[in-house]
Image (cartoon, rainbow, N blue to C red):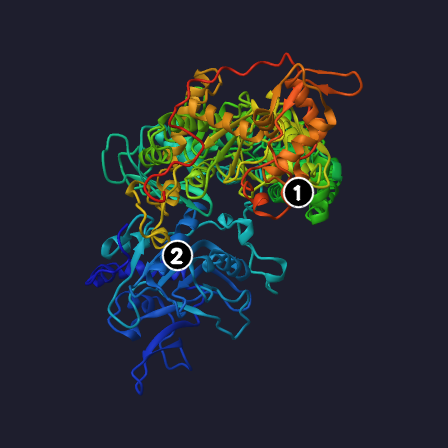
């Protein structure tokens, strides 16, 4: 966009059309003609000062000539301003904002950005605001209306327009006008300078048209094109509260006040409701499917090049008040030029070939059906006298005035886009991309309020229609209409009572059980498609890697935060994996393959992956990148270590499992030594069986698992089980490279440091900021390969060997057998003595005697390994080496010498049946690969 700096020598354009401008301004700004604002030069100080004119009859009274002189101004005294409200009844036609703040942090660029932000917000609502500047960092914003409005309405709307100023760094409130809701007789209120010349210098306004800042003839032409907007564009949130209402009402409009924007079944309102459900990336996807290409992308703005153009910018999509608005400034893009298009207008254009008034009227019926708005689009103001007198002839459902009926009204209005999930005890609302779990119930409260607003508007319109019919009726028809009038007034009274928040709560409670609203078992309906990944710009079918539109029938509650682009670059990400698994490309390849499995909801692998290695080895960066790409709280759940590790407190609260529902990846992090794997829980969480959980103070519910488990740890957890049922589920992925930092040179200055392994502290941030789409594309690519491979992961030799070494290191009983025991048919050792010998060896190895495996577990392993008989108690036919010494005292050097070794503790676990499937033979291991950390230079 062009900068907001007015050009020099533009006075002529304003002077030439001064007569037209005077007529335009007089009709739109000057509701008060007994006073106007002016400027004068203080003769003593030379400063420019304000005054109210005429003052004590010594100045020219207001007239069109005064306004004409303003647009031909050559000096300060010629410049005037306008008051906003009439005295007494206090009505006006303009709401304005003066964006300069005058605070200590006044920033011209910030002011411009905020002014344009307000312009786009208003344009999204259908307004054509006037935004002007004279340079110097000050901006005036005006919203012109096509009829007089109460001062309370104008004041409330102005305050709402600038209510987000704090988010742009304004320490003082941005001024909005009018500042009062009521101006008493004899008082003036506040005034603001009229557009045109600046009051202190010969600078004429630049104005913004939504695309460019205009000067001279273009600026004047734009100003004269603004004729005033209808008041029904004001959103409900910007309307005055009861406390804001003035004491005196302004005269009623001849045509009557338009229905409020909250009327749920009016044409404009179904568009507004639909537009609020559409995400920016959804609209981006619509344009991409028409052949337009994304040129640049920001956080809340996407710039496009039209189909057939290779460079530049043709149009953009930007979030305005949370709604994605398309702004087109190309005559060849197939979109209306130089205007903002809401999502409903864009979709209407692409689906019907037009988005004019007639096309939108037809398209409204399509949206009403999609939104579940089953009541008819006609309103009582447009109904005939006969339909007003015979409401049963209308096709809308007939409800009585009870809480139960209000629940059915809610279901009738919003069925198809909202459900109450009984076993979750939570509402879900479809937002155009996914079914969002409404834990705070704010979304459904908004929908309920919309239903109440509709009830009130329709009841009021019905009362008015019947009143008009009564004025023309007689005889029996008059009597019947009077009865209908009583019913209509009762309905209006009920609608007002329904606006009470307690009544809103009763409406929602009554709606829970309505057909089409209630879902008994959420796990049977939501997030059941394991082969889909929901992204902002569509849903990815992971079996093929194709992107398609969002569908509410997919019943997905999750949304990945990153848009899917199969061609996105991932060079740095792949290079990062190559360095992390330096010299072992098969492991890097396997980690990528696992990421493809992790992005799906499949659990056929039934494994816990343990990413193990000392600090500064890349495993944290990798998982943080995956988490950022898939979304924490969306497709990724970061759980406490106790989800997988024992804390000695027995069963934990079932709420810890609620975070697993619908996620595809669960990550636990643990670095403490001597933590023990909770093998029973690990088997349950990797087994693929139905998971039972409950929310705090809620009932239990069930869901099918979709998660894969990853444990990040510097210290491998102790595993007491030795059976196949435990170890077939564990896969240890060693992270052996260590990355060094400059501070390490100070610790060991004589060591050698390889440049290849110098830590890049910004790498993780870089991957998440610039290659997130590429990482997601790679994960989807691997998911397609995962499905093509029939849903299996085949670990490389390095991972198999590392896991086997891990298993051997945890089998302390097996180590004892290997070091100190041999089979001997002539040997006779009692079971109790055999166990005592093991405990003595255990202590000699420097292990804590309190953590020695139990006698029961030792006996079970001994019976599997050696021949035995039971003449009187267990007798094992073995020979035990007597070479170990007596246990060293606790705390001695002998006690500490092997403190690095881990020891299992606690009762033994049940082994799997003898006919359990045998593990596959491991592939030939790489002789250079071991679990000892690899060194690349000294000390790394």
**Residue 163 at x, y percent in the picture:** 49, 58
Q: Is residue 621 left or right of residue 682?
A: left
Name the residue at 41% across, 52% down.
228
* 558 is higher (above) or lower (below) than 922: below
**Residue 340 at x, y percent in the picture:** 38, 42
Q: Residue 295 has which mark? A: none
**Residue 535 at x, y percent in the picture:** 45, 32
- Residue 782 is at least partly visible in this image: yes
Q: Quadrant of the C terminus?
A: top left
Residue nearer the viewer, 286 or 343 = 286
- Residue 388 is at least partly visible in this image: no
Q: Residue 114 has which mark? A: 2
Name the residue at 27% across, 40% down.
313
Name the residue at 41% across, 40% down.
617
Q: Is residue 785 left or right of residue 879?
A: left
Residue ID for mark 1: 459
Residue nearer the viewer, 852 or 344 = 852
* 220 is higher (above) or lower (below) than 268: below
């Amino acid at each position: 966009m062009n900068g907001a700096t007015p050009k020099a020598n533009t006075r002529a354009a304003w002077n030439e059309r001064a007569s037209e401008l005077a007529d335009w301004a007089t009709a739109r700004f000057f509701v008060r003609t007994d006073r106007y604002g002016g400027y004068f030069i203080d003769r003593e100080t030379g400063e420019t000062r304000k005054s109210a004119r005429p003052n004590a009859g010594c100045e020219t009274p207001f007239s069109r000539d005064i306004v004409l002189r303003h647009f031909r101004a050559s000096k300060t005294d010629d410049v005037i301003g306008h008051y906003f409200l009439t005295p007494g009844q206090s009505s006006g036609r303009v709401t304005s904002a003066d964006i300069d703040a005058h605070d200590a942090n006044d920033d011209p660029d910030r002011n411009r950005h905020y002014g344009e932000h307000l312009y786009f917000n208003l344009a999204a609502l259908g307004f054509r605001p006037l935004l002007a500047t004279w340079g110097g960092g000050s901006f005036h914003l005006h919203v012109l209306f096509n009829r007089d409005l109460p001062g309370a309405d104008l004041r409330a709307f102005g305050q709402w327009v600038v209510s987000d100023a704090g988010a742009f760094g304004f320490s003082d409130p941005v001024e909005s006008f009018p500042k009062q809701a009521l101006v008493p007789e004899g008082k003036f209120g506040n005034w603001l300078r009229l557009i045109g010349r600046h009051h202190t210098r010969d600078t004429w306004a630049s104005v913004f048209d939504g695309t460019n800042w205009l000067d001279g003839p273009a600026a004047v032409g734009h100003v004269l094109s603004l004729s005033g907007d209808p008041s029904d564009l004001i959103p409900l949130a910007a309307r005055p509260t009861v406390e804001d209402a003035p004491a005196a009402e302004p005269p009623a409009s001849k045509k009557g006040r338009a229905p409020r924007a909250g009327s749920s079944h009016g044409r404009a309102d179904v568009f507004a409701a639909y537009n609020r459900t559409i995400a920016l990336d959804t609209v981006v996807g619509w344009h991409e499917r028409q052949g337009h290409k994304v040129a640049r992308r920001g956080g809340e703005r996407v710039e496009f090049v039209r189909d057939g153009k290779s460079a530049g910018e043709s149009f953009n999509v930007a979030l305005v008040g949370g709604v994605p608005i398309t702004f087109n400034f190309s005559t060849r893009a197939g979109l209306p030029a130089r205007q903002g298009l809401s999502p409903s207008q864009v979709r209407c254009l692409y689906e019907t070939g037009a988005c004019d008034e007639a096309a939108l009227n037809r398209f409204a019926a399509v949206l009403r059906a999609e939104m579940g708005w089953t009541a008819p689009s006609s309103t009582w103001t447009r109904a005939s006298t006969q339909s007003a007198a015979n409401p049963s002839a209308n096709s809308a459902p007939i409800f009585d005035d009870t809480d139960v009926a209000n629940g059915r009204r809610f279901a009738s209005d919003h069925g198809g886009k909202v459900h109450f999930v009984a076993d979750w005890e939570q509402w879900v609302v479809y937002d155009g991309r996914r079914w969002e779990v409404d834990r705070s119930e704010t979304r459904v409260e908004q929908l309920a309020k919309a239903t109440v607003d509709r009830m009130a508007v329709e009841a009021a319109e019905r009362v008015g229609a019947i009143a008009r019919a009564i004025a023309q009726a007689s005889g029996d028809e008059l009597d019947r209409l009077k009865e209908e009038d009583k019913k209509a007034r009762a309905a209006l009274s009920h609608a007002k009572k329904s606006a009470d928040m307690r009544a809103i709560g009763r409406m929602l409670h009554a709606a829970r059980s309505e057909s089409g609203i209630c879902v008994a078992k959420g796990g049977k309906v939501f997030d059941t498609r394991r082969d889909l990944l929901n992204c902002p710009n569509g849903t990815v079918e992971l079996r093929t890697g194709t992107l398609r539109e969002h569908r509410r029938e997919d019943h997905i509650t999750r949304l990945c935060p990153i848009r899917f682009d199969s061609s996105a670059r991932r060079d740095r990400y792949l290079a990062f994996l190559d360095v992390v698994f330096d010299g072992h490309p098969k492991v890097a390849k396997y980690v990528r393959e696992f990421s493809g499995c992790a992005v799906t909801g499949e659990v056929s692998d039934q494994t816990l992956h343990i990413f193990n290695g000392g600090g500064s080895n890349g495993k944290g960066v990798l998982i943080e990148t995956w988490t950022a790409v898939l979304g924490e709280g969306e497709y990724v759940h970061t759980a406490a270590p106790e989800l997988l590790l024992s804390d000695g407190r027995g069963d934990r609260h079932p709420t810890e499992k609620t975070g697993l529902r619908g996620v595809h990846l669960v990550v636990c992090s643990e670095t403490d030594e001597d933590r023990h794997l909770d093998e029973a829980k690990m088997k349950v969480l990797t087994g693929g069986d139905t998971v039972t959980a409950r929310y705090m103070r809620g009932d239990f519910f069930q869901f099918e698992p979709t998660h894969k488990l990853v444990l990040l740890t510097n210290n491998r957890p102790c595993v007491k089980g030795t059976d196949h049922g435990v170890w077939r589920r564990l896969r240890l992925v060693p992270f052996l490279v260590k990355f060094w930092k400059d501070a390490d040179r100070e610790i060991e200055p004589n060591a050698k440091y390889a440049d290849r392994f110098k830590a890049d502290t910004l790498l993780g941030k870089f991957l998440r900021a610039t290659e997130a789409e590429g990482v997601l594309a790679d994960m989807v690519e691997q998911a397609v390969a995962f499905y093509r491979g029939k849903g299996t992961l085949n670990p490389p030799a390095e991972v198999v060997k590392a896991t086997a070494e891990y298993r051997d290191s945890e089998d302390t009983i097996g180590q004892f057998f290997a070091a100190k025991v041999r089979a001997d048919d002539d040997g006779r050792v009692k079971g109790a003595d055999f166990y005592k010998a093991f405990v003595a060896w255990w202590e000699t190895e420097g292990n804590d005697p309190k953590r020695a495996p139990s006698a029961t577990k030792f006996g079970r392993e001994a019976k599997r390994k050696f021949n035995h008989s039971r003449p009187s108690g267990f007798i094992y036919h073995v020979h035990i080496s007597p070479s170990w010494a007596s246990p060293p005292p606790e705390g001695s050097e002998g006690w500490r010498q092997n403190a690095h070794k881990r020891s299992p503790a606690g009762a033994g676990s049940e082994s799997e049946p003898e006919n359990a499937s045998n593990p596959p033979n491991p592939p030939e291991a790489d002789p250079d690969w071991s679990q000892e950390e690899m060194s690349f230079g000294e000390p790394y």
